[in-house]
């Protein structure tokens, strides 16, 4: 048995799978991302909900967390700096310095990057360079194995780790911070601490694996291990995110595009993606969930409107158009609400197509198969509109929960390690 834990922005979830990838148990709970004390409580609550016979059969555990959230700990694991959240822009004062030591395409040249916020904390005199920087998912794993000096390729990216050279560039390594060692996602790190195993009734030989980010775990859940060039995943949540696997890394900070490294069966892939400010939040601004369902039933997706919408809640777009002043385009509004909704669905679908076109302009392969995750993927009318505009093969996701991806990550890597 293998367990995956997903610690996202609004809640935590676990899924337990068997060797064939079949779900044997699932549960969820709430926690507060900004309150590190709730992380351990949520983890233990989820574990204790797993039936004892499954806990005693666990061989591996994988964990994902929000990308860029971290805490500062002393050498004994005591938290000295409370959670620094992934979307906190307080790294802005460090950007001028970072531009002087990092290449133009570096992911860290953002006010929300992990490295920018770390340097800002140090400049403010509130970060001691003897402290350990511990990412969100790694802190949660710490509660199980009591190790805190490692992280994975995906979480380390915003810390300035070079996923191509597989090292911290000298300019970053020489800053004097205690940076974690970096290993591939899903690497078995250590068995569960014997006292924790006793307390929670877990197999004492269960391996705790290095983690990944919540969005990467969701990608893995959607595609399983069917990795091939051109595999793409669109997330239709509050915002629209597109990602595609290729053999070339793509980095373009002006569009918020960066690439995560995946190595599967000794083959390296690069998952490149970007996120738009458009998406489901615009739809729910105008209509309730019940209205969205009712109005969708009145739409004929085979008959397009002539509306040329660019649905945004406020001015500003980051991808696939980089324009902080781009105005929303949601007029004229038809008399019939279902046509207004259809125009917005078509607008988001056009943004999705433009997003994949943008990635291909920068070196990504054409889409071979497209998976869809997020609440918007449950709307058959929206699916039909997207299929008409994108003209690519669609496939149902293997699973829609990121926790499933974390369980797969542990399963695959522990099996690989066992085979030598």
Image (cartoon, rainbow, N blue to C red):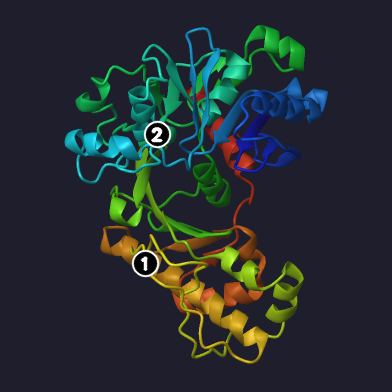
User: SS class of the residue under badge 2?
Assistant: helix
Q: State the image coordinates of residue 306 (x, y, percent, origin top left).
A: 49, 91
Q: Which quarter of the figure is the C terminus placed in?
A: top left
Q: Nearer the viewer, residue 31 or 331?
A: 331
Image coordinates of residue 23 in percent, x first then y, are: 72, 41
> Residue drawn 62% across and 18% down?
143
Residue 379: x and y, percent? 66, 70
> Is residue 148 placed above or below 367 in the rendered structure?
above
Marks 1 and 2, the one that precedes in the sequence: 2
Rendered-image quadrant of the N terminus: top right
Q: Local crowd at mark 2 within 10 Å, few (<14), some, or many (≥20)? A: many
Q: Residue at x 49, y 44 (%)?
A: 216
- Between the residue at mark 1 and the residue at mark 2, the CA separation in whole angstroms equals 26 Å
The residue lying at 36 percent from left, 23 percent from top is: 122
Q: Nearer the viewer, residue 343 or 189?
A: 343
From the image, tell me which residue sits under label 1. 325
Residue at image mark 2: 114
Tell me the residue at 66%/8% (across/down): 194
Q: Is residue 92 above or below residue 115?
A: below
Answer few, some or many: residues within 10 Å of disc 1's Cα (few below 14, many 20 plus, some between 14 and 19): few
Residue 360 visible in the shown view: yes
């Amino acid at each position: 048995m293998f367990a995956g834990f997903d610690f996202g922005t609004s809640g935590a979830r676990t899924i337990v799978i068997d060797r064939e990838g079949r779900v044997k148990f699932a549960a969820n709970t709430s926690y507060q991302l900004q309150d590190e004390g709730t992380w351990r409580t949520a983890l233990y609550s989820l574990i204790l909900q797993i039936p004892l016979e499954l806990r005693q059969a666990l061989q591996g555990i994988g964990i994902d967390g929000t990308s860029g959230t971290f805490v500062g700990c002393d050498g004994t694991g005591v938290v000295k700096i409370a959670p620094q959240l992934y979307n906190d822009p307080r790294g802005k004062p460090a950007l001028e310095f970072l531009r002087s030591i990092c290449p133009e395409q570096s992911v860290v040249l953002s006010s929300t990057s992990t490295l920018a916020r770390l340097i800002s904390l140090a400049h403010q005199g509130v970060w001691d360079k003897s402290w350990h920087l511990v990412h969100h998912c790694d802190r949660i794993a710490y509660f199980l194995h009591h190790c805190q000096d490692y992280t994975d390729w995906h979480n380390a990216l915003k810390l300035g780790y070079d996923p191509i050279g597989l090292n911290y560039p000298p300019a970053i390594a020489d800053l004097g911070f205690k940076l974690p060692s970096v290993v591939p996602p899903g690497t078995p790190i250590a068995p569960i601490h014997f006292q924790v195993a006793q307390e929670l009734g877990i197999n004492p030989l269960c391996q705790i694996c290095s983690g990944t980010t919540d969005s990467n775990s969701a990608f893995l859940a959607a595609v399983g291990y069917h990795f091939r060039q051109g595999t793409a995943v669109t997330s239709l949540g509050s915002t629209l995110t597109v990602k595609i696997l290729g053999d070339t890394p793509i980095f373009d900070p002006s569009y918020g595009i960066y690439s995560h490294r995946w190595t599967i069966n000794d083959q390296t892939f690069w998952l490149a993606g970007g996120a738009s400010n458009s998406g489901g939040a615009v739809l729910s601004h105008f209509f309730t969930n019940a209205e969205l369902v009712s109005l969708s039933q009145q739409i004929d997706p085979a008959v397009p409107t002539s509306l040329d919408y660019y649905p945004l809640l406020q001015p500003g777009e980051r991808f696939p158009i980089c324009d902080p002043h781009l105005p929303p385009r949601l007029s004229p509004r038809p008399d019939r609400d279902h046509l207004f909704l259809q125009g917005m669905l078509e607008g988001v679908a056009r943004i999705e197509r433009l997003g994949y076109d943008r990635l291909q302009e920068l070196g990504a392969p054409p889409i071979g198969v497209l998976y869809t995750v997020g609440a918007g993927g449950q709307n058959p009318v929206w699916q039909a509109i997207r299929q008409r505009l994108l003209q690519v093969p669609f496939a149902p996701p293997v699973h829609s929960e990121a926790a499933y991806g974390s369980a797969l990550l542990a399963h695959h890597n522990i099996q690989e390690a066992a085979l030598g």
